[in-house]
Amino acid sequence: LRNIFRYAQFIGVIFFCLDTRKDDETVFIRNWLKWLNITHRIITFTRFFWVYIASISIKTNRVQQVLHAMRLVLSIPNVAVILCYHIFRGPEIIDLINQFLRLFRQVSDLFKTKTPGFGGRRELILILLNLISFAHEQTYLWFMTRKGFSWRFLIDWWCDFYLVSATNIFIHINSIGYLSLGVLYSELNKYVYTNLRIQLQKLNTSGSKQKIRRVQNRLEKCISLYREIYHTSIMFHKLFVPPLFLALIYKVLLIALIGFNVAVEFYLNSFIFWILLGKHVLDLFLVTVSVEGAVNQFLNIGMQFGNVGDLSKFQTT
């Protein structure tokens, strides 16, 4: 996860830094980094725009021209959204990320003896697949070029990589975001089912008031955490789902463009195009699985605790 964070900083999507001077990690805005990323993005997109127009003009196939033109047109609102988020939505994004970090600390504190982590095998596999996708974004042009490497190629590669990776980052942000929500719900559900439920079922009307109060406080803490996770998911949805819609349209268009190239030029670089096609399908798969996991964990929330209703202290809770 930290490597993904550094990668997002590297491609100019993240304009804030981690503060680890205290016991609790938080993030804060670096204004110089924000404006450096904005300037860099404008320059790289301007060069990409004119180079791409020139490449469209020399294509002879009309369908290819239309698909490439649509890709170029759709890249404009994607870049505009990133710039607007940098300039206008920075404080909201900072608050959201700090809220995620705070929730992970609070949920982890419920398990006194457990080592802090991020999910299990499923989450590890999905994160590794995200890293594979990142690596492909950086290197795919190296295998598609038929000319030798030159300074011009490196500049064109950087502009293309900077645009493509930044457009895809909204898909990756949603993948990691919903994966995080799923982990939070999963860990809290696990605590409720394996710890809190047992404690509540052991209580009876003869239990001491202090013991009843302690368990009641834990129950109220869990309910409060469920509310906070839900409100955080709403905030995340409002911030990042609209640009995800644009990114998905862009992604579907890229899949259509690559599929057309495979069909028309099957005898040339077909293996490379199939890998490229598989990468874009993988991105769609990752965001779909992450959303599905978060929804399933939300639906697994259960606060039925058997006979604790006999205790009047828990009637209102």
Image (spheres, rainbow, N blue to C red):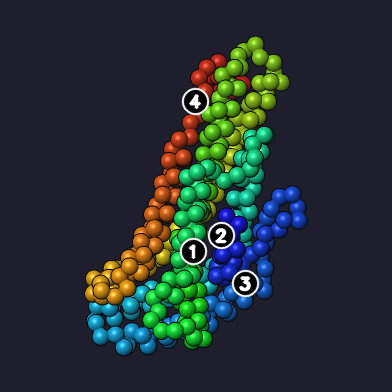
Residue at mark 4 = 304
* C-alpha gap between disc 2 and disc 3: 18 Å
**Which residue has dot 3 on it?**
34
Q: Examine the rendering and report whether any part of residue 78 can be seen.
A: no
Report, in whole angstroms, how far the alpha carbon at label 4 lies from the one at label 3. 48 Å
| Residue 219 percent coordinates (x, y) | 60, 30
Q: Earlier in the sequence, mark 2 or mark 1?
A: 2
- Which is nearer the N-term, disc 4 or disc 1? 1
- Disc 2 and disc 1 in contact, CB within 8 angstroms: yes
Does label 4 or label 3 sit earlier along the sequence?
Answer: 3
Under mark 2, the amino acid is Ile
Closer-to-camera residue (30/58):
58
Q: Which residue is pictured at 46% across the width and 40% down the height? A: 298
Identify the residue position indicated by label 2 in the image: 4
Mark count: 4
Q: CA distance from mark 4 to mark 2?
A: 38 Å
Q: Amino acid at mark 4?
A: Gln
Q: Are marks 2 and 3 in contact (CB under 8 Å)?
A: no
Relative vertical location of residue 13 with respect to residue 312 in this rendering, above or below:
below
Residue lying furthest right: 21
Few, some or many residues within 10 Å of mark 1 (<14, 14–19, 20+) = some
Q: Is residue 133 visible?
A: yes
In front of the other: 302 or 282: 282
For the point 69% across and 20% down, which residue is it? 211
Does dot 4 land on a helix, a strand or a loop?
loop
Image spot of residue 265 (x, y percent): 26, 75
Secondary structure under tag 3 reads helix
Q: List the residue tagged with mark 1.
A: 134
Q: Tag 1, which secondary structure? A: helix
Kind of residue indicated by mark 3: Lys
Q: How far is mark 4 from mark 1, CA to CA?
A: 43 Å
Q: Quadrant where the N terminus lies?
A: bottom right
